[in-house]
């Protein structure tokens, strides 16, 4: 037995094999502390050759740790075979056991033919292990050092996913791989081609917010090394679903998603060139990407024929604030979109044609959208937005022609805009939008011109008002889902004026909008009002207010309101018997009966009055009523005067039950407007 000094080169031992071998020798042992070469380091290698005859024997190789280019190959390994040296050397019935840190225990079966050291060689092998799967391959080399290898195998997907997934993620599935490789010397790799298929592929993060399941995909990769690696790759995603919160995607039923690219991998950089993405039912895109050293990745995407319905639903809507209008909208049309990143979004170009936006709840609809523009994170941009028609809360509006300047986090209108609506128009000036920090805010000056109230009240299902609405809005603001104005909306209604101040709508276009405002009435003419409502004839004028109005989903929640008559010279204050009857019912009485109905209503059609007034204070669904004297008047606690008569015959209308359910009061009012007899009830 011979033992080499530490750090001895084991090739010296192999030199003995090519020289004459004494016939008396039966066993040769060679040991070394370590062995290193280009790209590898082997610890405690040893060789034992037991010679049974001059041209045959048994050989065993073993070692401790193997390091390959800063990667651990194995912890320990042992190989053996029957060696025949007559003519070309042959290693038959080879077997081996490997303990791999990455894959656990492995078993190996192989055979090899070696014409001469440094000459032609051929090897076939089969490798199996619970952690690695089943593999088989072959390797051939020529006398000039050129070699070629092939392999095929099936392995658990987690082996290949582990380097790419964070720690503690679970993965599953199977990979079936086949490939070949070639090099100019035994330590050189020049060409690689791989084909693989993933079956039932899946992964999941510990919190479940990132996952995939039932994935099926095919990959083909070709790589060539000449100073740097370069090649091409094609991926077909055929089945499965991926959740990467907030996005969720499924393989389309129309066909496989195809992703292809040429690539270059250098020592300090990598590039994707000429990338193409085809997603059936969604669109196509070209892309490229690059990273140099530790700099951020720079990449760009140029998408064409993008179908806006699935694109908005699956890629835009998930990033919108939950419960907001954009998070509910459906989109339509076709778009071209070009984006560049590095780091973050750096620029964008788009063109959207035949577009539409629709709220499934019916709060908003915009048809015939055309938009184009470009945006930059570092320079000025511009945009256009046009639409044909639309509606908001069932109120139709007309076309828009908009032209805007874009900043990194802002949008500014370049000219005034006007939209026809309700027989009039809505004008917008000095529109400015900001989206700093992810939140959107809008500011503008607006003007309402001659909006007709009749179609407005009809479309909203309110009692039919007539007249027009006009207003200047010096400051209209939208932020955080809240629309507000610090101006006054003034409407000309029934010969008088209605002023709305401190108007604000929270959760605008949301599922439960909240409106707050203060309203004041001046000089409303009662005759045209009562003619519209079929309430009965009343002549005169009214002033009044609604303070602290709160509407939830357009239904009253609370307010303090009062309407009261005002004297005008030359204007008779008169009321018909029908109106008296309806006012009596509105105040909680059962109508006018008895001797008055049988006598006075036969003799008189109209009556004069001194004062007319009604106050309503709504809280928690209960309305507290008051009359001409207001809520602080010294009236009986259970009675209040709605009408104080004048002259003869003198008629006073007294209301009963100061407190009543709001729903009952509305029922009385609507019945009076329709000329019906309401159902009586209590508070």
Image (cartoon, grey):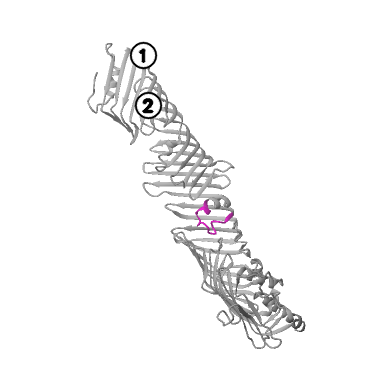
Residue 420 % position (x, y): 62, 68
Mark 1 packing: few (<14 Cα in 10 Å), some, or many (20+)?
A: few
Q: Secondary structure at mark 1?
A: loop
Q: Secondary structure at mark 2?
A: loop
Residue 463 visible (yes or no): no
264 in magenta: no
Viewer-side residue, 112 vs 659: 659
Residue at the far left in the pictured view: 5
Real-space Cα distance between discs 1 and 2?
Answer: 23 Å
Rendered residue at 58%/42% (across/down)? 253
Q: Which mark is residue 421?
A: none
Residue behind mark 1: 86
Viewer-side residue, 668 vs 31: 668
Q: Quadrant of residue 21?
A: top left
Drawn side of residue 542 relative to residue 483, left or right: right
Magenta highlight range:
315-331
């Amino acid at each position: 037995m011979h033992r080499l000094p530490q750090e001895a080169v084991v090739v010296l031992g192999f030199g003995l094999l090519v020289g004459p071998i004494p016939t008396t020798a039966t066993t040769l042992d060679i040991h070394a502390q370590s062995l290193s070469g280009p790209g590898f380091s082997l610890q405690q290698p040893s060789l034992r050759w037991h010679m049974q005859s001059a041209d045959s024997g048994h050989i065993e190789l073993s070692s401790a740790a193997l390091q390959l280019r800063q990667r651990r190959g194995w912890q320990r390994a042992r190989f053996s075979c029957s060696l025949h040296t007559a003519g070309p050397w042959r290693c038959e019935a080879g077997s081996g056991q490997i303990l791999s840190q990455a894959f656990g225990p492995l078993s190996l079966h192989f055979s090899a033919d070696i014409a001469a050291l440094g000459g032609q060689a051929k090897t076939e092998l089969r490798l199996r292990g619970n952690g690695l799967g089943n593999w088989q391959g072959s390797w051939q080399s020529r006398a000039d050092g050129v070699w070629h290898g092939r392999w095929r195998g099936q392995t658990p997907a987690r082996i290949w996913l582990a380097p790419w997934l964070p720690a503690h993620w679970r993965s599953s599935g199977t990979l079936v791989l086949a490939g070949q490789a070639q090099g100019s010397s035994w330590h050189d790799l020049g060409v690689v081609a791989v084909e693989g298929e993933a079956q039932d592929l899946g992964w999941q993060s510990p919190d479940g917010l990132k996952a995939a399941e039932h994935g099926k995909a095919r990959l083909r990769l070709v790589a060539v090394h000449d100073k740097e690696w370069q090649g091409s790759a094609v991926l077909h995603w055929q089945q499965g679903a991926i959740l990467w919160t907030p996005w969720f995607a499924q393989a389309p039923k129309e066909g496989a998603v195809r992703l292809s690219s040429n690539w270059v991998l250098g020592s300090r950089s990598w590039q994707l060139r000429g990338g193409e993405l085809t997603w059936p039912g969604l669109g196509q895109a070209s892309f490229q990407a690059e990273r140099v050293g530790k700099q951020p990745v720079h990449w760009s995407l140029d998408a064409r024929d993008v179908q806006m319905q699935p694109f908005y639903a699956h890629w835009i809507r998930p990033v919108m604030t939950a419960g907001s209008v954009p998070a509910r909208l459906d989109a339509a049309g076709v778009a071209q979109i070009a984006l560049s990143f590095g780091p973050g979004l750096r620029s964008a170009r788009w063109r959207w044609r035949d577009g539409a936006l629709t709220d499934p709840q019916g709060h908003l609809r915009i048809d015939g959208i055309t938009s184009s523009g470009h945006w930059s994170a570092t320079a000025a941009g511009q945009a256009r937005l046009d639409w044909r028609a639309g509606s908001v809360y069932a109120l139709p509006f007309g076309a828009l022609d908009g032209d805007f300047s874009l900043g990194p986090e802002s949008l500014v209108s370049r000219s005034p805009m006007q939209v026809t609506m309700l027989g009039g128009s809505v004008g917008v000036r000095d529109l400015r939008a900001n989206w700093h920090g992810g939140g959107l805010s809008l500011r503008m000056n607006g003007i309402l011109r001659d909006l007709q109230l009749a179609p407005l009240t009809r479309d909203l299902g309110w009692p039919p008002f007539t007249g027009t609405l006009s207003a200047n809005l010096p400051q209209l603001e939208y932020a955080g889902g809240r629309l507000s104005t610090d101006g006054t909306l003034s409407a000309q209604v029934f010969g008088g004026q209605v002023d709305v101040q401190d108007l604000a709508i929270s959760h605008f276009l949301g599922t439960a909008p909240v409106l707050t405002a203060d309203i004041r009435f001046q000089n409303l003419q009662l005759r045209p009002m009562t003619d519209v409502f079929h309430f009965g004839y009343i002549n005169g004028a009214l002033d009044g207010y609604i303070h602290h109005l709160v509407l939830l989903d357009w239904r009253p929640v609370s307010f303090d309101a009062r309407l009261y008559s005002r004297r005008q010279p030359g204007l008779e204050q008169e009321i018909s018997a029908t109106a008296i009857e309806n006012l009596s019912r509105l105040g909680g009485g059962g109508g006018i009966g008895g001797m008055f109905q049988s006598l006075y209503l036969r003799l008189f059609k109209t009556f004069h009055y001194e004062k007319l007034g009604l106050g309503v204070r709504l809280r928690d669904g209960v309305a507290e009523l008051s009359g001409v004297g207001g809520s602080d008047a010294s009236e009986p606690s259970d009675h209040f005067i709605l009408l104080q008569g004048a002259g003869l015959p003198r008629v006073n209308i007294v209301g009963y039950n100061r407190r009543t359910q709001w729903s009952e009061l509305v029922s009385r009012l609507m019945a009076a407007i329709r000329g019906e007899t309401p159902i009586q009830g209590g508070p």
